[in-house]
Image: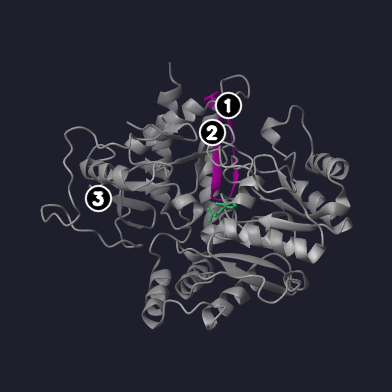
Amino acid sequence: MLEMSLNGVRLAPLDAPEGVTTVTLTDPALPTTTVGGPDLPQERRVVTEIPGPRSRALHGRRSAAVAAGVGSLLPVYVAAAGGGVLVDVDGNSLIDLGSGIGVTGVGNAAAQVVSRAQQQVASFTHTCFMVAPYEGYVDVCEALARLTPGGHPKKSALFNSGAEAVENAVKIARVASGRDAVVVFDHAYHGRTNLTMAMTAKSMPYKHGFGPFAGEVYRAPMSYPFREPAPISGAEAARRATSMIEKSVGADQVACVVVEPVQGEGGFVVPAPGFLPALSGWCRDNDVLLVADEIQAGFCRTGDWFACDHEGVVPDLVTTAKGIAGGLPLAAVTGRAEVMDAVHAGGLGGTYGGNPVACAAALGAIETMREHDLPAAARRLGAMMLGRLGALAERLPAIGEVRGRGAMVAIELVRPGGTEPDAALAGAVSAACHAAGVLTLTCGTYGNVLRLLPPLVIPDALLSEALDVLEDALRSATAG
Ligand SMILES: *Cc1c(COP(=O)(O)O)cnc(C)c1O
């Protein structure tokens, strides 16, 4: 049997458990698929062990057909989702604290996403914007110009995935600056394509064995307050990074500095206040383009429309993806008009980039964010999480730090008394939550961070119940 792990959490064996017979989803004896969306009952309901028999049977089929390199954190097979829950094929209703990795901030199958996508899919599904364009693409670019940080003239180009957006931001920055070097940070995550693997910090599982990687990518030290050997201000941490760049790369060689304003996969690292403004100032003084990778932190997640807004940082280019379209694949690079327009005609694109159905979904998602004031929702949910977990941290020495901004909250687990990472504990707590019907994710360079990314439309009572479960799991895993 193949065993795999993701960020320290052991994944279920890929072979079907013994004695499990394969069922198909058309078996009349089994419940029919529930319609998802916000009207799905918002409740935690565990009716089988997790994963249940139907999920295990599907997992058996999967092991024969799906490449082993594609993992699944929790192999419950989803039948419907909406609001703050995922309902699996066994009828379990799990509280979702992952949002498909920060994607479904507006909730799964959000009403405006569904209606706009349905209308679009019935009109036309694809023409290729580079062949025969359509209005939805322009609408999304106009919305991005309005919503992203800064009041300057902006333009956008649309793509399919976050990694593709990051790659294109680098392409644009290189053409616009006439320089080659790209600076990224410790603990960074920018994707899994060849260039973005070079930009991503963590080897296992993202890069291991996949080299050689793209050149001219340089890594600078991040501001990671919890792991600084001695207290250092944000401005000092920025100076540490920029002096490294000046010495080992040369400021006049650098096309762009790419930074996640709040790091995602690397552990929800929130840089010390002043770090981003100082970095931005150095970039301006040295004609280096600042690229904010807002793929995980953007679109209301941190309590602002974009995480850069918190300190009034205005990047030259912004990459977005995950939260943009309520779950449909869409990504964008948005930036200063003159930088974006530096690229020769035909230099940017791709068959599916800015697909009309994905654009329609994005317009529905943005409408939902605005109408339901999801930045405010993120701040309210964040205050709930930080309040509860902060109080718990004072009583549990294995909680090294609770941090985050808005509804992007992390619990960094350590061996009591120091900062030595405890990935096994993060795995155990996560597994206990899963068994109790709460979907949590882990992350972090050391795999020791539990991260909470609830849909921004989760009912308060449901989040509170999930926090009860998490608290119990943390207490029992650290007792004895
Ligand atoms: C997820 C992520 C990416 C990559 O996005 P994909 O759509 O998975 O390619 C890039 N940057 C950040 C910050 C991310 O969180």
Residue type, numbered disc 3? Val
The answer to whether residue 384 is magenta is no
Residue type, numbered disc 2? Gly
Q: What secondary structure is marked by label 3?
A: loop
Q: Which quadrant of the figure contains the N terminus? A: top left
Return the x and y of residue 248 as percentages of the image width and height: 84, 41
- Residue occupying image coordinates x 20% and y 32%: 18
| Residue 240 visible | yes
Along the line of sight, the residue nearer the viewer: 446 or 347: 347
Residue, disc 1 = 421
Along the line of sight, the residue nearer the viewer: 398 or 135: 135
- Residue occupying image coordinates x 59% and y 39%: 267
Number of on-image labels: 3
8 is higher (above) or lower (below) than 84: above
Q: Answer few, some or many: residues within 10 Å of disc 3's Cα (few below 14, many 20 plus, some between 14 and 19).
A: many
Q: Residue furthest top?
A: 480
Residue type, numbered disc 1? Pro
Separation of marks 1 and 2 at Cα, in angstroms: 8 Å
| Residue 44 visible | no
Magenta residues span 395-413
Residues under numbered marks 1 and 2 in contact, where contact means CB atoms less than 8 Å apart? yes
Residues under numbered marks 1 and 3 in contact, where contact means CB atoms less than 8 Å apart? no
Would residue 31 appear left or right of 152 to someone viewing this image? left
The answer to whether residue 405 is magenta is yes
Q: Answer few, some or many: residues within 10 Å of disc 1's Cα (few below 14, many 20 plus, some between 14 and 19).
A: many
- Residue occupying image coordinates x 43% and y 19%: 479
Residue, disc 3 = 89
